[in-house]
Amino acid sequence: MAGASLLLRNGRPMGKAVADVLVTDGVIAAIGPNLAAPPGVAVEDAGGALVLPGLVEAHTHLDKSLWGMGWRPNDAGPSLLDKIDNERKLKRELNIDPARQSARQAAVSSANGSTHIRSHVDVDTDHGLWGIEGVMATRDTWREVIDIELVAFPQSGLMRRPGTLALMDAALAAGAEIVGGIDPCGIDRDPKGQLDAVFALCQKHGKPLDIHLHEPGEMGAFSMDLIFERTRALGMKGQVVISHAFCLGTPDPALVNPLIDAIAELDIGIMTTASASRPVPAVKPLLARGIRVCSGSDGIRDTWGPYGTADMLERAMLIGMRNNFRRDEEVELAFHVCTQGGADIMRIADYGFAPGKAGDLVVVDGEAITHAVVAHPPRRLVVKRGRVVARNGACLKAAP
Amino acid sequence: MAGASLLLRNGRPMGKAVADVLVTDGVIAAIGPNLAAPPGVAVEDAGGALVLPGLVEAHTHLDKSLWGMGWRPNDAGPSLLDKIDNERKLKRELNIDPARQSARQAAVSSANGSTHIRSHVDVDTDHGLWGIEGVMATRDTWREVIDIELVAFPQSGLMRRPGTLALMDAALAAGAEIVGGIDPCGIDRDPKGQLDAVFALCQKHGKPLDIHLHEPGEMGAFSMDLIFERTRALGMKGQVVISHAFCLGTPDPALVNPLIDAIAELDIGIMTTASASRPVPAVKPLLARGIRVCSGSDGIRDTWGPYGTADMLERAMLIGMRNNFRRDEEVELAFHVCTQGGADIMRIADYGFAPGKAGDLVVVDGEAITHAVVAHPPRRLVVKRGRVVARNGACLKAAP
C-alpha cells in the first residue's frame, strides 16, 4: 500500500518537547524542531498535543460486533458454552454480517487511533468461512485506513464439531495469516487431539499459532505444558501466542513460575485484556523477563456482553487499573503493551516512532502519556502511512 | 435550597417510552406524555435521550484531587503508609488547596451527572481542619449545583498521631455530617483503641459512621467483627457504612458468609469502587440479601494515582466489568448501585425518579440504560432541583 507525505507540526512526540514529524511516502523521515515543509507536502498542526505511534489492537473479534445494529438486551446464559451456542444461533437470526460489522468496528478502531488489528475470526460448521470472507473483504477495502490480519479461530471447538478442521484448513489456504485454537481441555475435552491438529495446521501452512486459553489453574497449566511440548518439539520458538492465559493469574508462584520460565525460553507471546473479573497474568513480571506482551479489546459490544469501545488508550487504563499501576513509569508499561507490545506480537517490522518506520501516528490531548491513558479523550488526528484517516474522534472513511 | 421549575420534553425516562418530566419548584410534579407547560416554566428538549435520576457519588475525596494543577508524575512508594505520608508532605509543598480543588472536582462531578456527593475529608495534625473548612466552603457555594456531605476522615490514623481525635471532634462540632475511620489494625495497629474512639464520637455527636476498611482476609474479618460488636451494643443498626470491605472479596465462603449475615442483620451499608486490583465484595449477593450497596470514584487524579474521571456512569461500567455482569438486568444492578444505592446509603429522603421526589435528573444519549453505562457519552443536560446546572458535558458554574 503506497504511503502519503505529511508534515505534522507542533506536536509533543511521546510527551516530550514540541517538535515536528515529517512523513515521506508513508515512512517517518525526520522528527525534530522546525522541520521545513517539502514542496507539495500536506501540513497539519498538532497544536501542542501528544504525538504517539499508532495503537495496536492485537486481539479482537471483528466478525461479530453488534455495533450499530440497535440495542439488543443480553440474556445469554452464564457458561462459556452457553455464550458460544447463543452466538452461533444469533448470527443468522440477527444477520450479524461479518463484512459489514468488521468494517464498522474497523472504523471505530481507527477513529480511536489503532493502526493495526489482529482479529480472531470464527470458523465453524454452521457458518463455514462466512466470517473469514467478510473480514478479508474489510481487510482489503480498508487497507488504506488500518492493517488487519486474521486468525482462523475455531470458536465452537475443533474436535467436538467434526468438519471444523477442514474449514480451518480452507481458511488458511484462503489467506488467514494465523492458526487459532481454544481451550483444548475446557471446550474440546480432547487436549491432545486439538493441539496435535492446530500444530499440524501450523506446520502444513507455515503459519504461527495464537491460541485462546481461558482455562484457569491446574487445567490451564496442563494445557500450557502441552503447548510448550509441541512448540519445542516442532522448533516453533517465537511463533506461538497464548491469549488470555488466565492460569498465569493463579495466586501460586509454584504453579506460575515454571510456566513463565518456559514461556520466556520458548519466546511465547502473551495477550491479556486485563479482565477485571478473572485471574489474569501480571504484566510487569512478564515484561521484566523479556516476554512479549500485547493486549486487545476482545469482543466489542457483541452477544457475549455489552462492553468495549475499541479504544486501546482506554484498554491501557484498564491494564493499569488491573495491575495496580500508579506511578507514571508503570502506566507507561500499560501503554507499551498497547503499542510496541502489540507490534512485537504481530511481528510488524516497520512499526515504531523513529525515522525509517511507518508513518502511523496518533495525535491526542494530554500533558503526559499517562494523562492520555487515564483521560483518553477523542483523538485529534490519526495518521496511517502519512495519510490522515481520522479527525476529532471520527473516521474519515464511511462505514457501511 | 429553593428549587426551580422545568418541563423536560421528549426524553425516555429510565430508557422506557418517550415522555415529558415536569419539575415544579424543584420537585418532580409529573412524568408522562405530552405534559402541558405551565406559564413561565422553562422548557428543555431531551431529543429522545435517556432521562435518569441524578447519579450519586457516595465515596470520594474532594479535598485532594490534583485536577487542573498541571501534570505531576506520580512516584509514590508502594505501601499504603508510603502514599499517606507522601500525600501529607505534598499538600503544602504543592498547595493542594482543599477549597479550590473540591470546587474543581464538584464541577467535573456535576458535569458528569452527579447530584449528590459524600466526601471523606482528611483530618490530621499537620493540616488540622484545612480540608474540612475548604470542602465546607465548596459545599456552601456550590449548593445550587450539587449536594455535598462531609465525613471527617482520619486518613493518617487516629491513635498513631496524638491530637487527631480532638481535631475529629472539632470537625464534627463544625458540621461534618459523618464520623470516619480507617483500618483500625493495618493503619492504627490498635483496633480496640480506634473503634472505641470513633464509636464514642458517633455517640457524642449523634452521627453515623462510614469507615474505610482496606484490610483483607482474616484481619479485615476481625476488624469487621469488632465493628459489628459495637454497632450492636450501641444500638447503631442502620447507621454504619463499611467502605471498600476488601475482606468480603476473600475467596472463602466460610469466612465471608458469616460476615454477610451480620451485615444484613445490622443493616450495615457497603461501599465498593469495584477495584480491579484488589479482592472486592461481590455486588449481586449483597443486593440479594437486601444490603444497601453504593459506590464512588474514590480519589480522582491525586497523589495516590492518576485514575478517575468522577463519572458515575463509567463507575457503573467498572462495577459491571469487575462483577462479570453481562446481561442487561445485571448491568442495571451496577447502575442501581451508582444511583438509588448511593441514596440508600446517604439516606437521601427525597431521592428518586417519581412524582414528589427531588427534580435531580441526567439526560444522556443511549438506547438503553446498559448502553449509557458502557458508552457513558458526555451528558446532554444535568438538572439539580429543576435547574439546569450542566450542558453538553460542561458545568455551567465556573470552577476556580
Image (cartoon, coloured by chain):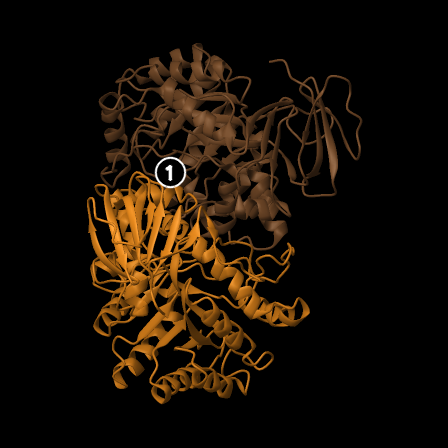
Chain colours: A brown, B orange
**Image-quadrant location for residue B400:** bottom right
Q: How many marks?
A: 1
Q: Residue at x 60, y 57 (%)?
A: B68
Q: Is residue A228 visible?
A: no
Q: Position of residue B166 (x, y in %)?
A: 50, 88
Amino acid carrying label 1: it is His
Label 1 marks which chain's residue? A
Element under disc 1? loop
**Image-quadrant location for residue B367:** top left
Q: Position of residue B183 (x, y in %)?
A: 44, 73
Q: Is residue A342 above or below residue B282?
A: above
Q: Residue at x 36, y 20 (%)?
A: A98
Q: Residue at x 63, y 36 (%)?
A: A52
Q: In the image, is B275 to the left or to the right of A336?
A: left
Asked whether A201 or A335 is in front, the reply is A335
Q: In the image, is A288 to the left or to the right of B174?
A: right
Local crowd size for mark 1, using a 10 Å CA cut-off: few (<14), some (14–19), many (≥20): many
- Pointer 1 residue: A214
Q: Is residue B144 above or below residue A71?
A: below
Q: Residue at x 43, y 53 (%)?
A: B390
**Image-quadrant location for residue A89:** top left
Asked whether A226 or B158 is in front, the reply is B158
Q: Is residue B246 visible?
A: yes
